[in-house]
């Protein structure tokens, strides 16, 4: 006999994202959650390949309530956990990841679903952005990070520092309608509107949200969220932490205020469980991942 109380005990059962069904059947699905346990593109601490599993585990605690949203997304949208793709070992690891993420993202998006991807390091957006651009045309990139990740790659040798440059150079992203938010580094300028943390952290989130919306307009949006956008006090479990970022409360308020932008796909990356004291990074990531779903709804 199955007891009603069991669904409230977060430590039991198979940890799919928020206990959503694990399936690759896409008929009548609104949002698919896909994991990419890949970290061969890191330039500092490795271990983000374990991020998707950590986020899924904490999601069953973080996502059981709808706060601060005024409805439960699971009661309005049909959501599945698609499982993991893009993991491999050996000299073709990056090649396999790029190919598999593109092919599976294309399948999901062509079925009429929105896509939330859990990383993994910040090399992973290539496949999903390319697939989304094939379906929707040029995209606005909304990029939350402490780093710009806009160093040009060389000879196809990609890492987590390259996607923001490479994908606008390919024509997938329109930099004039794209924003990088909470940035705390200096990298190649390639036309994005940059909201540096030194200013953005001290703005009212209402003001910052309006500025971001003005940049994006009504374009289809690919939203990529590096957990190191948060200050390390809120997210220590990441590969390349930078001090001086926002709190989790600020970020969640900002995402709430961005409701209405046209997010077609999103990812959340760079959770590194080995450095995650008390699992607070995975907890923040799971809650923010659910917020990203509300922006797709």
Image (cartoon, grey):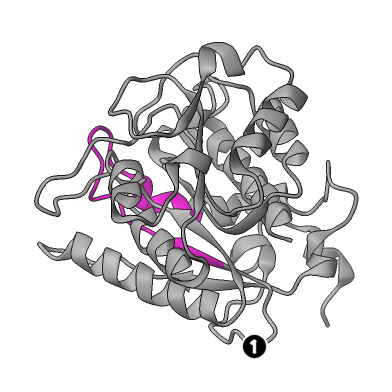
> Could you tell me if residue 249 is visible in this image?
yes
121 w.r.t. 195: above or below? below
- Residue sitting nearer the eye, 45 or 94: 94
In this picture, residue 147 sits left or right of residue 208: left
Q: Residue at x 53, y 11 (%)?
A: 198
Residues in magenta, as a range: 33-53
Q: At which x and y percent is residue 235?
A: 52, 29
Q: Is residue 204 above or below residue 103?
A: above
In the depicted structure, whether residue 211 falls above or below residue 174: above
- Specify whether 259 is left or right of 22: right
The mark tally for this picture is 1
Whether 135 is among the magenta residues is no
Residues 71 and 49: in front is 71
The residue that mark 1 highlights is 27
Quadrant in the picture for residue 94: bottom left
Quarter of the figure with the N terminus: bottom right
Please identify the quarter of the rendering in which residue 162 is found: top left
Quadrant housing residue 170: bottom left
Helix or strand or loop: what does disc 1 sit on?
A: loop
Residue occupying image coordinates x 42% and y 19% = 184
Q: Residues within 10 Å of mark 1 (few under 14, many from 20)?
A: few
Q: Classify residue 185 as left or right of residue 141.
A: left
**Residue at 21% over, 40% down:** 152
- The answer to whether residue 226 shows anywhere in this view is no
Q: For the C terminus, which image quadrant?
A: bottom right
Q: Residue at point 65% right, 45% down?
A: 217
Q: Is residue 38 magenta?
A: yes
Residue 171 on image: x %, y %:
35, 55
The image position of residue 28, as x and y in percent, is 70, 84
* Relative side of 3 to 280, left or right: right
Residue 21: x and y in percent read: 65, 76
């Amino acid at each position: 006999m199955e007891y009603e109380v069991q669904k409230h005990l977060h430590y039991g059962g198979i940890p799919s994202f928020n206990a959503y069904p694990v399936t690759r059947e896409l008929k009548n699905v609104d949002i698919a959650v896909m994991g990419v346990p890949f970290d061969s593109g890191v330039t500092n601490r490795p271990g983000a390949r374990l991020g998707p599993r950590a986020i899924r585990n904490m999601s069953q605690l973080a996502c059981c309530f709808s706060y601060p949203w005024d409805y439960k997304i699971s009661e309005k949208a049909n959501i599945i956990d698609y499982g993991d793709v893009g993991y491999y070992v050996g000299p073709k690891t990056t090649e396999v990841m790029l190919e598999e993420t593109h092919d599976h993202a294309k399948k999901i998006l062509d079925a009429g679903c929105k896509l939330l991807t859990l990383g993994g390091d910040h090399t992973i957006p290539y496949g999903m952005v390319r697939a989304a651009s094939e379906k929707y045309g040029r995209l606005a990139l909304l990029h939350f990070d402490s780093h710009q990740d806009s160093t040009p790659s060389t000879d196809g040798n990609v890492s987590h520092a390259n996607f923001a440059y490479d994908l606008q150079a390919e024509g997938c992203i329109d930099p004039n309608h794209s924003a990088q938010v909470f940035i705390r580094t200096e990298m190649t300028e390639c036309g994005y509107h940059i909201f540096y943390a030194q200013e953005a952290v001290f703005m009212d989130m209402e003001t910052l949200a309006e500025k971001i919306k003005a940049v994006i307009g009504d374009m289809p949006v690919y939203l990529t969220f590096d957990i190191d956008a948060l200050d390390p006090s809120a997210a220590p479990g990441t590969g390349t932490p930078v001090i001086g970022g926002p709190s989790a409360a600020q970020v969640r308020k900002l995402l709430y205020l961005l409701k209405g932008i046209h997010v077609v796909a999103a990812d959340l990356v760079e959770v590194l469980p080995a450095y995650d004291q008390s699992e607070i990074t995975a907890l923040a990531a799971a809650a923010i991942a659910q917020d990203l779903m509300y922006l797709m709804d």
